[in-house]
Image (cartoon, grey):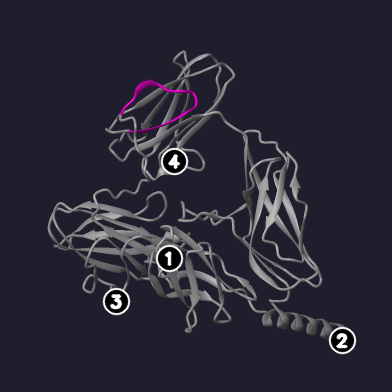
Amino acid sequence: MRPIVFAALVVVLLVSIQASRAAAPKLDALYPAGGQRGQVVAPVVVIGKSDKWPVSTWCSDAKVKVECEELKNRLRVTIAPDAEVGVCLIRIVDAAGASEARPFVIGNGPEILEDGENENLEKPEVVEALPVTVNGRLERKGDSDFYRLELKAGQLLTAALDGYSLRSDIDPFLHLFDPGGNEIAVASDTHNLDPFLQYRVRESGEHHLQVFAIDHKASTSVGYSGGPAAVYRLLFTTNEAMRLGLPLAADRMESDGEKIAARSTVAGVISRPGEVDAYSFSARKGDRHEVRVEARRWRYLWDPVLTIHRPDGGLLREVDDTKASADAEYEFTASHDGDYRVSIVDRFRGGDAEHRYRLVIEDPRPGVSVTIDKDRFELGAGKSIELKLKLDRTHGHKAELKFDIDGLPEGVSCEATSADGKAKTATLTLKASKDVAFANGPFRILFSEEGGEKIPVLYSFQTGESRGEYLVNEIPDLWLTVGKGRE
């Protein structure tokens, strides 16, 4: 009996030690999830958990200052007037480690915070003036937010929502109602799960917009989704120039066999239903070419089909989607000298000013990207950890890679700093001396070919459950906690 009792005591002691060890802070979302540059945003609610308060903070943008307020889980974010419009990342940090990095959007226009009392059509939140960005949250399951807008006939209303893009676990929808209460427009998925609604107003008066969501991950639930971290940002504007697609000036309105260089990039538009744009380029037998049509990459929501014909008119290949995208691409070796013809058409034979594309014809060049499977690491005094890297080589890349680490604290060393030309993975080992001082901060892993530019290794937020792009898909800034700070 004694060995059994002793073993039980050991288990209890180990569990007690683990329970007493503080956990790293957890950050599920920030609310509001952004603010206007030149403004102070407070309070910004930390949605997550931290055993201690105040905590330290880290931000990817030096022109955004993040401080703790006295009340727990409340931050004060000061955005410099010259901060760059876009997205920064914020972590909360204590001696136990760092939280996941969460996005905070820096805007350039007026912003308001949802009042939280707008759950039905009878009690909507009144949006007084446009343009404006509303910072909202679907606080619990079954929640739905309503907004009232005074619109004039002829105006082009745009309502663009970022929710999934902020890594909220929601699949949001927008429904627009006219002054008579009739549903007149609906928006759901775009290049990701977030909706983008545009509607030419037909009747002046009060219109209402409803925001709701379902779970974006597989679920048996059929009701509206929501929760403390279901944050979103909703832009309202009547700016006629507002578009979902990124700027892509079309220098070809219609092409019927235009001759272009074998290494070139052109921008065009399928301007009318059924239009087929065609180009040709010269190739020599044995030349290797990659041909791409990019539309979804630029957030134009149509499905391009790429067709390539040989110099004798025979079909070489017709390509629709690839594994990673609805855009089309094909790589081939020319079998004959002569002009190859490239045709582009919408799979569903549509066409208008929003059917923009970029055609790229280039030589496939060897390349490599390197990613890491985690973004936060803990290293005890006198211990070692492994950093596992994935090397994605394309087009026959075989160069040896060398690795450097920028930001390692004193007392921490790195082993295994290269990978040969055949390697598809690499492992770097970090070792801490027995007397290493406590350290807690960001670091970067850099890779390079002999004599080449040093490029950051990236951690990706994208997973197998992702359904399109986030506002920030990957980061170079990793985190290392060293020493006894976790005791």
Residue hosting label 2? 2
Quarter of the figure with residue 415: bottom right
* Main secondary structure of the magenta stretch: strand
Say the numbered circle drawn on residue 326. Answer: 4
Depth-wise, is mark 4 or mark 1 nearer the camera?
1
Q: If you read the primary sequence from the N terminus, does the residue marked by circle 3 or circle 2 appear first?
A: 2
| Sequence-first disc among 1 and 3 | 1
Q: Secondary structure at mark 3?
A: loop
Kind of residue sitting beneath label 2? Arg
Task: Tell me the number on the disc at residue 117.
Answer: 3
Q: Nearer the viewer, mark 3 or mark 2?
A: 3
Q: Give yes or no for residue 263 being in the magenta stretch.
A: yes
- Residue 339 to residue 154: above or below: above
What type is the residue that disc 3 sits on? Glu
What residue sits 47% from the left and 42% below the top?
Answer: 325
Disc 3 versus disc 4: distance between alpha carbons?
A: 40 Å
Judge the density around disc 1: few (<14), some (14-19), many (≥20) Cα neighbours within 10 Å: some
Quarter of the N terminus within the rendering: bottom right
Callout 2 crowding tier (Cα within 10 Å): few <14, some 14–19, many ≥20? few
* Distance Cα–Cα, label 1 vs label 3: 31 Å
> Dot 1 corresponds to which residue?
80
- Amino acid type shown at disc 1: Ala
In the rendered view of the protein, which quadrant contains the C terminus?
bottom right
Q: Is residue 159 something one can see in this rendering?
A: yes
In percent of width and height, residue 240 lies at: 24, 49
Residue 90 to residue 370: above or below: below
